[in-house]
Amino acid sequence: MVRGSLVGVRMERSPELVAVLLGVLKAGAAYVPLDVSHPQERIAAVMAEAGVSVVVTGEDVFEPVEENPRVHIRAEDLAYVMYTSGSTGVPKGVAVTHGNVAAFCLDTAWREEVVESVLVQANHAFDASTYEIWTPLLRGGRLVVAPAGDLDAAERGALIAGHRVTNVHATAGLFRVLAEQSPEIFAGVREVSTGGDVVSSAAVQALLAAHPDLVVRSTYGPTETTGFATHVRFSGGDDVPAVVPIGVPLDNTRTFVLDGFLRPVAPGVVGELYIAGAGLARGYAGRAVLTAERFVACPFTGPDGSGGRMYRTGDLARWTNDGRLVFEGRADEQVKIRGFRIEPAEVEAVLAAHEDVTQVAVIAREDQPGVKHLVAYVVGAADGTVLREFAAVRLPDYMVPAAFVSLESVPVTVNGKVDRAALPAPDFADGVSGRGPRTPAEEVLCGLFADVLGLERVGVEDSFFALGGDSLLAMRLIARIRSALAVEVGIRDLFTSPTVAGLARAGGEARPPLTARERPDEVPLSSAQQRMWFLNRLEDAGAGAGYNVPVVLRLSGEVDVAALEAALGDVADRHESLRTIYPTPAGAPGSGCWTVRGVAPPWSSTRSAGRPWGPRSPSRSGAGSTCPVNCRGGRGC
């Protein structure tokens, strides 16, 4: 491997993966991410086109290297080549430079306190990984790398809570499932970003209702612009429109909505979206003609006085009157499935190569709200099972059609194009078997399967995925099963046993009921309690009452002082944390904390002698806010 080499990285998500990517870049090379789940035929095609010189896999073992190779990296040097679906039937590699990555990751939209601890859950062959890995590393943050494979909501929640994750990015489909089904897992997170497809307004509102202090950031940007190009921020109390906009450009990005003559259109008028700026990729590796078609000369002067280049996204958009961009669809046939960019022509080219297929059309359908599938319409003798197997060894999982519909001929319009409106919806119920449930658990599971898949009924031996299920629907199903049956099942159980009968057999143990445990006489202090004790001792030494929170309330009518004091005592009795003391034998809180009942909070009252409420009243009423609290027991001042 020499400077400028392209290194294939075929590894599962892991801390070792991050180390390998860093090593490749520090050596002056660029990495080509290879998804371990992709068929070997596709991986071989990517490696051949990219000119990969060496491949690093999860089985490789390396000796630790202490020395920095000290290779001088320039902004224009290649950082990675990431492959996406291609309209010609062959995937295309987007060549991204170090300068592109630096401009994106150092944008002021990503604040240090937000990227302090980022959950890494994207595949490194997916452009969201650019944000999850390089943004925190370039800003002094920490990576929390999720285990390899699919994760359900509970597993994500455990990672978030256990590692104090401050920032999570999820594709639009995954975000919707988590926000609507399991919003509690985001407790403690400062910001959740989403994008990659149309973002659900209801999901944004649901998450903000559950966590008003959270920020939800909707993002947009093709791989050709290095991660994201635009964003919009929502927090508690904000009005989230029914159609979530894709927002405003990042710092070093310029966006244009143009007509067919490259002229800007007025706000409210739909045009094609073009993007220019520091995040614009070098182009497509080894595809000079395609690069010239999509990366065109920019007729508008940039900050440096030159026009430079701009990327023709193929997305339709419009400006709002307040300067935000709204996505309005595609100018071509490209679609998004679960956040992945797919050119139906590539899927059609693969299926058309089968000897028993004479004609094929592939489209994305959303017959069930929020659930988008690829559907293949086929003319020929090949049946759906054969074609599914044929496609699975040549295409990534997300590009294999969920349904295959046999036709006598593909309907066309008077202009000779495929008449999409005339294509029938697939009937997933055709794949439902006859045997019904035999046990109460199977009956409940059959109902849940059918409800999530949008079917009238499901047999106990029917495969969830053969009936149109995918990883996002699987997460919905797992959440419903846990709630309905109180059993501990995970998404891996569903992938291993995708039928009602299989899940009923391997459904796991019922969750034990929550019961109070016997308390020891002394409870050890948590790290947070130790910190509070230390600060309290500083206050005793004259450092003040830094953790006191003064609150001024205005009551109307007569105040029964005795009743108010008794009520505060009842609250303290009800909430253990309000009556916890820290005994300090030998000057240290080593013996733990005790909770004492029947101890009312310190109380004092001052009558105003009928004087009206005035500007000095808050200062008089807040005089006790500087009084230190006696954490060792007894009353304060």
Image: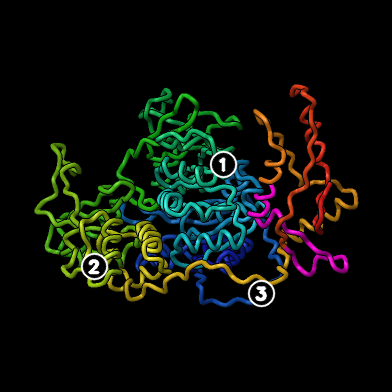
Label 1 neighbourhood size at 10 Å, few (<14), some (14-19), many (20+)? Answer: some
Q: Residue furthest right?
A: 541
Q: Give the residues drawn in magenta, as a range.
A: 568-594
- Residue 64 got which mark? 3
Assign a secondary structure to mark 3.
loop
Left or right of 290? Residue 63 is right
Earlier residue among tags 1 and 3:
3
Residue drawn 59% across the image and 29% down it: 305
Earlier residue among tags 2 and 3:
3
Considering only vertical position in the picture, is 461 above or below 415?
Answer: below
Give the alpha-carbon distance from disc 1 to disc 3, as whole Å.
35 Å
State the image coordinates of residue 92 (x, y, percent, origin top left). 40, 54
Left or right of 13? Residue 630 is right
Residue behind mark 1: 278
Image quadrant in which the N terminus is located: bottom right
Give the alpha-carbon distance from disc 2 to disc 3, as whole Å.
49 Å
Earlier residue among tags 2 and 1:
1
Assign a secondary structure to mark 2.
loop
- Residue 326 got which mark? none
Q: Is residue 230 magenta?
A: no
Give the alpha-carbon distance from disc 2 to disc 1, as whole Å.
50 Å
State the image coordinates of residue 563 (x, y, percent, origin top left). 68, 41
Q: Is residue 40 visible?
A: no
State the image coordinates of residue 325 (x, y, percent, origin top left). 45, 33
- Residue 462 got which mark? 2
Q: Amino acid at mark 3?
A: Pro
Count of marks overlaid on the render? 3
The scheme the figure's colours follow is rainbow
Disc 2 vs disc 3: Cβ atoms closer than 8 Å?
no
Assign a secondary structure to mark 1.
loop
